[in-house]
Amino acid sequence: MTTIFLFVLLFALMFVGMPVAVALGLSSLLTILFFAQDSLASLALKLYETSEHYTLLAIPFFILGGAFMTTGGVAKRMIRFAIACIGHLRGGLAMASVMACMLFAAVSGSSPATVVAVGSIVIAGMVKAGYSQQFAAGVICNAGTLGILIPPSIVMVVYGAATETSVGKLFMAGVIPGIVLGLMLMVAIYVRARVIKLEPQPRASLAEVVRSGRDSMWGLLLIIIILGGIYGGIFTPTEAAAVAAVYAFIIAVFVYRDIGMRQVPHVLVDAGKVTVMLMFIVANALLFAHVLTTERIPQQIAETIIAWGMTDWQFLIVVNILLLFAGMFMEPTGIILILAPILFPIATQLGIDPVHLGIIMVVNLEIGMVTPPIGLNLFVTAGITRMSITQVARAALPWTMVLLLFLGFVTYVPALSLWLPSLLF
């Protein structure tokens, strides 16, 4: 009865248009009032405790670092380097755009930010080079999803906080899948480019490759600082986020000088707005997770599924279908915070590694970001290209098929996610 009331109320509130954060908090509050033994005082205390979770401190710092990197000219330099490396291949400009998304994803931690930073520069350039606008928009819309798979990833931090899974392991688990997905998109682009007979760009000279690599070096160093620092034992993921924010500020203001000191307050305010919005969702969602745990709802669901005799591979099919459906209507953070506390104990009882489950969830949420009606990347790409949402969704569909194929690999080849963390932990 408690489970039915909680979920019916949650989805009813969301259906009438209430913001996800408020729906999560209100459904949790009413469930506790009517069914649980907790007092309202303990509820207020729990809300405060969730907000001061140490792991969650990484979120505002990664957002701030990403804001400095997006506002500065880091993306422009990475795009130039990517074009110099592989722009001469057939479909090379689109492939270089995917490579630029991979590089920028490793410094931003956000999918929409990756689409904005890279797409606002390369889509117009691809159209001038003879690509159709639909081709360019579809590629960038899908390649931008790498922002939440390649570390550092804000979504992985949220999953780690919701399930008490090591953020360091999650970051390392995302490296190989992120590279593989990028390569799969590049192969698909190359095949498509040969079919439609796209002309290759002139090959860049070795001097241009070296020069563009040197110019983008300061941005690329951030990847080494974050991952090297974490896995070298120098600092935790949360401390790495703080270092990344300071480093991004120094690079954008004093090295590249793309941002003046007068623009810094504006960047801080923008990052603060995103942080407040995200942390409000997180605090209410962790309150929701507290209700689930108190009422033993995940454990009851797990016992039911095991009683049905469901195997791990069958459970993962259900997980993928559930997450793909949820991704069509909700943003990634809300999905992680609602479903991770439910799916995590079931997966654990079935012998599925929590890190593997985390990567599966992230890949599903990537696909959700390019599927209508709520896919964030669709709206961002539409804003850049001035195309309609329907046009962008149609343009993105062929490349989304690559993401779905990749989801199958990630789901049923655990070594893709777990091999690298097993070497380092």
Image (spheres, grey):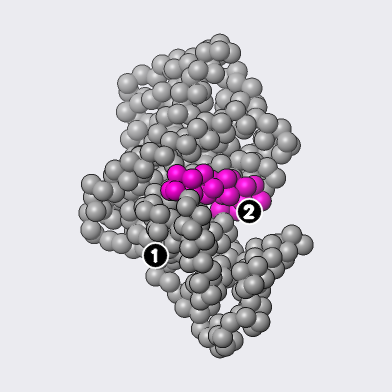
Label 2 SS = loop
> Would you say residue 260 is visible in this rendering?
no
Given the current orientation, which residue lies at the most extreme right position? 16
Give residue 371's position: percent from left, percent from top. 63, 41
Q: Looking at this view, is 53 or 219 the one in front?
A: 53
Residue depicted at x 46% and y 23%: 187
Magenta segment: does it hold 185?
no
Q: Looking at this view, is 185 or 341 the one in front?
A: 341
> Would you say residue 351 is visible in this rendering?
yes
Question: Is 216 displayed left or right of 36 in the figure?
Answer: left
Give the CA separation, mark 1 to mark 2: 23 Å
Question: Is 416 displayed left or right of 2 in the figure?
Answer: left
Q: Against 230, is 39 above or below?
A: below
Q: Against 346, is 105 above or below?
A: above
Q: State the mark number for residue 413.
A: none
Q: Quadrant of residue 382?
A: top right
Question: Is 373 displayed left or right of 356 in the figure?
Answer: right
